[in-house]
Amino acid sequence: MAATNVHAGQGGAAAAVAAYLHQHETKGLLRFITCGSVDDGKSTLIGRLLYESKGLFEDQLAALDKDSRRHGTQGDNIDYALLMDGLAAEREQGITIDVAYRFFSTDKRKFIVADCPGHEQYTRNMATGASTAEVAVVLVDARKGLLTQTRRHSYIVSLLGIRHVVLAVNKMDLVGYDQSVFDEIVAGYRELAAQLGIAHVTAIPLSALQGDNLLQRSPNTPWYRGTSLLEYLETVEVAAHGGAIGFRLPVQWVNRPNQDFRGFAGTIAAGVVRPGDEIVALPSGRRSKVARVLCAQGDVESAIAGQSITLTLADELDISRGDVIAAGNQPPQVSDQFAAHLLWMGEHSLLPGRPYWLKIGTRTVSASVTEIKHKVDVNTQDQLAAKHLELNEVGYCNLYLDHAIAFEAYADNRELGGFILIDRQTNATVAAGTIDFALRRAGNIHWQHVDVDKAARARSKAQVPRCAWFTGLSGSGKSTVANLVEKRLHAMGHHCYILDGDNVRHGLNKDLGFTDEDRVENIRRVAEVARLMVDAGLIVLVSFISPFRAERRMAREMFDAGEFVEVFVDTPLAVAEQRDVKGLYAKARAGRIPNFTGIDSPYEAPEHAELVLDTVHETPETLAEQVIARLLG
Ligand SMILES: Nc1ncnc2c1ncn2[C@@H]1O[C@H](COP(=O)(O)OS(=O)(=O)O)[C@@H](OP(=O)(O)O)[C@H]1O
Ligand SMILES: Nc1ncnc2c1ncn2[C@@H]1O[C@H](COP(=O)(O)OP(=O)(O)O)[C@@H](O)[C@H]1O
């Protein structure tokens, strides 16, 4: 028996975990999570499991060596990934997760326990701990019975696809080992489990403190005929996720040491592979056959889920990191739109329409939530309307990706169905997600070919289409300068159009106000319109406050290189407020306009604008000339 301890966010874990797993290599591994609060006796239970199993050693491990596990390097340690894979990849993104991993083993199995504290940050902590666990031990205090937190934890357990739950009814000694107390709690829990779709529930009466039914059956509960907790953990059969589906290899890197060898390396997410198997590379859909399957020791006859391999193929296919090589006769789906659950972990709320990085398997693409269908009260599972998601909230959302990816429903395969969302400015992990299904409309909408293209339209107008994107505070001078620019360009015979916030908000965007989420949508829509206008060959002048960097960046990325010219109308707040052309600042200061930019709603100044206009020292005419020079240059 051996046990060791590692805290996520601390670590040096790579080497220690690798060493630990190697030492017990021949035994099966079970990952489980414990949920419940300290009051329920969770610490006692875990401590006792480790202690009573004898031979305990505890070892605090030094800080995680970030470099050692940077993705895409050859040095990625596979055993380490065993622990840190899946949703747990967020640690790399700098999120603080309060999950303690402990390791111990018996003669029969080795175990990794993710111990998540039950307090405040439960959602993201549990998401982290549960994302790789096969079993959840849900603790209940026999005196208190099922609590809101039992419901909450069980919901997250079910959401993250844990199929085996141990209902550990603890502190049985304090209710006199009364069978009726136990039976009542179990009956209540079975009802809950049925609602949540948890298939396998095993209830065990325990006293963590006294050791009843922990390692052996206790004489204090003669009416209980089941196994002890440890026996259960040693023997429970957990079918591998994705066992029924075909071979899937998310490609981690392409190994090309010389011209003669081109291998695709990664960890098998599901299924089995053998030389000669038909495969399909996704999302490209190209087909070939497996030539060789290589493990660390060299060529092998077959490899299975969980193993790290390098494949070579019979044909030269263009496959790169992030692609999925899959069984040719049983490929996963490919889509760019999904319905998914999101567990929001970000300090700032989720804003529909804002692009985030979505990381699934080894692939990273840009994605945004197009709609929050509802959020879920994690305590009651009630579905509530929502415009945004806050820290620790769970929402059911539609997502749109800028590239199609190979995926599987999370219920079928955690590797290809679980993802994280990453904030593009801060690189922090802001959500864990589970794919439910692809939206059918994704497959039904295709790009329609048109014969007259942007270049032809631009030629007929004898101009280079561009988008000048004016951003700045209200009253900074966006409209004034944009107007002058249009007037002059028009006089020169150019084809222009001004999209002004005030005007567009009277029509296309009249349903939007000034909350963060409405501003995100406001900018998304006008950026799409501007893009269409540039595609039509026009020079477009967008004059919106556009206060957030994320949306200005999104707008920029909609255009071809050189088309987007960000113009920062750089007027200090004090100056804009003094001008107060429309009297809005006075109203905002008087508290009559909530969420006013610069007053109680942020303005994030551009960091890399193509042009910065100084309206304090230059005249509008001079500034207009600067913009024109840039647009026609
Ligand atoms: N709460 C609040 N905050 C900021 N601005 C407000 C607000 N309420 C009304 N207005 C008026 O709306 C104009 C800004 O609209 P935009 O579409 O450019 O704003 S944003 O880009 O969505 O932030 C802005 O026009 P400009 O002064 O031309 O910038 C204001 O006149
Ligand atoms: N150098 C300058 N550039 C632009 N506007 C200026 C300048 N100096 C003073 N102003 C005045 O500032 C105000 C800017 O208002 P506006 O153009 O409507 O701003 P915005 O569109 O950014 O809300 C106008 O009254 C304009 O005359």
Image (spheres, grey):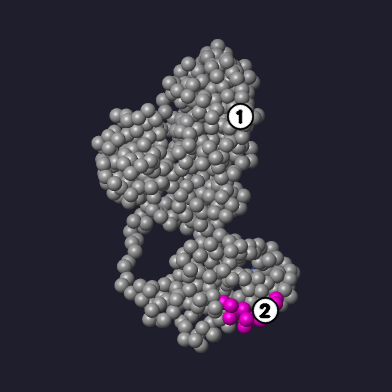
By secondary structure, the bulk of the magenta-drawn segment is best described as helix
Q: 592 left or right of 291?
A: right
Give the extent of the magenta segment.
Answer: 616-627
Decide if ligand 2 comes within 8 Å of the CB at mark 2.
yes
438 to 76, vertically: above or below: below
444 to 591, vertically: above or below: above
Helix, strand or loop at label 2? It is loop
Residue situated in front as seen by the camera: 609 or 528: 609
Residue 221 sits inside the magenta stretch? no
Residue 623 sits inside the magenta stretch? yes
Q: Residue at x 51, y 25 (%)?
A: 19
Q: 239 left or right of 383?
A: left
Q: Residue placed farthest to the top in the image? A: 219
How far across and down, in percent of the image, does residue 323 sit? 38, 47
The residue under label 2 is 618
Q: Residue placed farthest to the bottom in the image? A: 491
The residue under label 1 is 61
The numbered disc on residue 301 is none
